[in-house]
Image: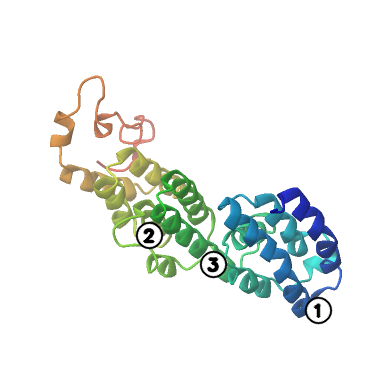
Amino acid sequence: MAMNEEDAMTQIEPTVRYLQKPGSKHIDVILESSKWVFSLCQDKEEEGGPGSAMELIKGDLEIFVADLSAVDSLPKPLIVTFLDHLKSSTPIQLYLEFIVRSLRLQDSSFHEKFIQIYLLEVNRLHGLGRLESGQETYKKLLAHLEDSSSYSPNWVLGRLPPDSMWQARAITLGTIGQHETALRIYVEQLNDLRSAEEYCQPIYEKTAAVDGSVFLCLLKICPRLNVSLVDEQSEETPHPYARPSPYFHPAPTHPQKLPAL
């Protein structure tokens, strides 16, 4: 009879507690001994599908994330390499979330591996037809691209697909100042003028409202849109490009600080 998750947790707890004690000098022993613990996770996922062993995986990861000095001293690059060789991507994804978001480590290798794991997972889920789960993972990828500055934009751009994940490409282009290309993606590929305006706002605010070139860039792009799309919309469902924009109609105070239109 297959072991349920609660029984598996009971079985691994003594091993997990033991492996939290040796410290970094014995990292090889810790990693080797951890293989058996994580093999149980793999067995449970194969029985119940991805996500079915989540609590068991979190319990296993206590070997590497517990709030103990011996655990904190463990060399994190070696742990990432170890987890990366497991069949399931869930352990490394959870571990990277821990060191990037909780510990806030800024090592670019961690951040780029995090991005790589997200990209692979999005593609895997879409390939399985699990579009909703794929979209949730894609949103996590977008959030990481926006929040982190510890990755090489060119590295990311070289790994994005050429015909999808447009918003990820736009965010990454924005980090290296390629605002016109990013805005063209929002307007011409995603047909989302509102997001294009929202993209412009923080850039405009960072320059203390003395440089409106990013909005001028958007205005230069907008006339090239296929305006026939607007005619296809009913009055009840106006096209988003037809919505009034608060950014394109600023108040007339301090006119010297506003972009010349």
Indicate the amino acid at tag 2.
Leu
- Name the spot of residue 38 as percent of width and height, x first: 69, 64
- Name the spot of residue 52 as percent of width and height, x first: 61, 49
- Name the spot of residue 95 as percent of width and height, x first: 65, 61
The residue shown at (54%, 58%) is 148
Indicate the amino acid at tag 1.
His
The residue shown at (71%, 50%) is 4
Mark 2 or mark 3, which is nearer to you?
3
Q: Secondary structure at mark 3?
A: helix
Disc 2/disc 3 C-alpha distance (Å): 19 Å
Disc 1/disc 2 C-alpha distance (Å): 43 Å
Residue 34 sits in quarter: bottom right
Task: Name the residue carrying label 1.
Answer: 26
The residue shown at (22%, 43%) is 222
**Would residue 104 be visible to someone looking at this image?**
no
Q: Mark 1 Cα within 10 Å, few/some/many (few <14, many 20+)?
A: few
